[in-house]
Image (cartoon, rainbow, N blue to C red):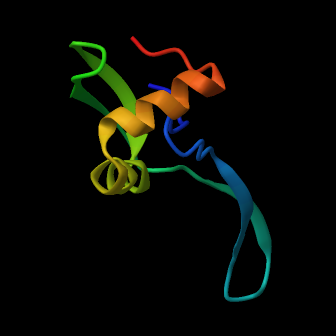
Amino acid sequence: MSSRCQVTGATVSFGHTISHSHRRSKRRWTPNVQRRRFYVPSLGRTVRLDVSTKGLRTIDKRGIDAVVQDMLARGEVIR
């Protein structure tokens, strides 16, 4: 599964882990991406999306139809 949210575009971010002695080592933060199925009434079918938890909150707030229309306008592939 990809580490990219299809709704918000959240990707992996990088930084440092700092120990007690202030030695720095590289690390990465991955978004909490889940694969979910949604029924989209405007398309008349279900779609599978890789969404982060923030993307799920966006879908709850704006509605799946509005989110899918924005994704299609961006050229996002919806399966």
Quarter where residue 72 is shown: top right
Work out which quarter of the rendered image holds the N terminus and state it: top left
Q: How many marks?
A: 0
Q: Where is 43 relative to 39, above or below?
A: above
Q: Position of residue 46 (x, y in %)?
A: 22, 17
Check the image and name the residue furthest to the right.
23
Instruction: Tell me which residue sits at (55%, 36%) in the image.
Output: 4
Left or right, 40 with reference to 73? left
| Residue at x 43% of width, y 38% of height | 67
What's the residue at 28%, 52% (across, down)?
60
Looking at the picture, tell me which residue is in the foreground, 2 or 53. 53
Residue 68 vs residue 56: left or right? Answer: right
Residue 36 to residue 76: above or below: below
For image coordinates 37% across by 27% down, the residue present is 49
Quarter of the image for the C terminus: give it: top left
Q: In the picture shown, does residue 52 fall above or below 22?
A: above
Q: Position of residue 53 (x, y in %)?
A: 36, 53
**Left of 21 or right of it: where is 9?**
left
